[in-house]
Image (cartoon, helix red, strand yellow):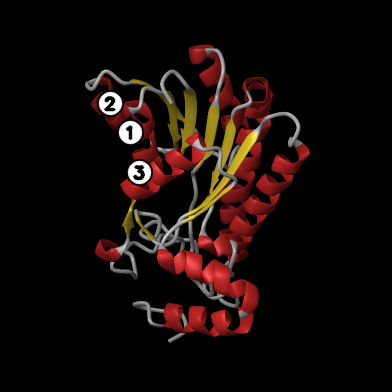
Amino acid sequence: MKGKIVIVTGASSGIGKALAEKFAANGAKVVMAARSLEKLEQLSKDLLKKNCDVYAVKADVSIEEDCKKLIESCIAKYGTVDILVNNAGISMRALFEDVDLNVLKQLMNTNFWGTVYCTKYALPYLLLNKGSVVGVSSIAGYKGLPGRTGYSASKFAMQGFLETLRIENLKKGLHVLIACPGFTASNIRNTALAKDGSMQGESPLNEGKLMTSEVVAQKIITAIEHRKHRLVLTTQGKLIVLLNKFFPEMIDKMVYNHMAKEADSPFK
């Protein structure tokens, strides 16, 4: 990773923040993007004290023009881009029959279109460098999660887009990684949208028992170094993906029962 130019979206917290820190520690030049410039600037200050080469850019990936400016800012600063990590994302928790459709639109705009926009504008440089496009997806991109229609839909869409992108560029040297963490200790559930679009505010899970963002980030970086196509994390996540191929109806029931046990579950 030494000397590589890396863009990480959603870098102000969670997996994105951990990725930015680990890329920088490994000698990469990191462009960190997020909606919160205040959080980015604090992270930038912390990393600059460690002699890391980082650059903060305020960007809302749901806005195409922001994504274009993000890539342009990276090119103006470093001249190219070697690795694009599409990490920015939001979640939700509400039954489809109750949810405001604007919630689903928000999730698609950030999780899916944000990936499309950033990848579109970075692609010429990534192709030139035979670089890497990474999508931080989810087990929800393999198995529909009840109460998360918008989240699962956006991750399924992201994975379909990235898989097609990989196939289109098989002979051009472009590396495409679809990374699917299981439940990870981060703030994505705290900021998840409720049925009316308000933030959930607290996680329904015991975050202390989940895989940490730092472990997830290191596994993603290792997968990039080995140019892997897919990364599925946690034992639970791997089992769901595997068993769903052979026993989908059984997994439907298991997933339903698991989600129904959450605190304040919409199924109760």
Q: Is label 2 in a helix, a strand or a loop? A: helix
Q: Which mark sits nearer the N-terminus, 2 or 1?
A: 1
Q: Is residue 250 left or right of residue 162?
A: left
The reply to whether residue 76 is visible in this rendering is yes
* Disc 2 + disc 1, Cβ < 8 Å: yes
Q: Amino acid at mark 3?
A: Ser
Disc 1: which residue: 21
Q: Measuring from the top left, give residue 63's x and y in whole percent.
A: 59, 38
Where does residue 257 sit, x and y in percent of width and height? Answer: 46, 84
Labels 3 and 2 touching (C-beta < 8 A): no
The answer to whether any part of residue 195 appears in the image is: no
For residue 13, the mark is 3
Assess disc 3: are there few (<14), some (14-19) or many (≥20) residues with their C-alpha within 10 Å of its C-alpha: many
Disc on the earlier residue, 1 or 3? 3
Residue matched to label 2: 47
Q: Is residue 103 left or right of residue 29?
A: right
Kind of element beneath mark 1: helix
Alpha carbons under labels 3 and 2: distance apart: 14 Å
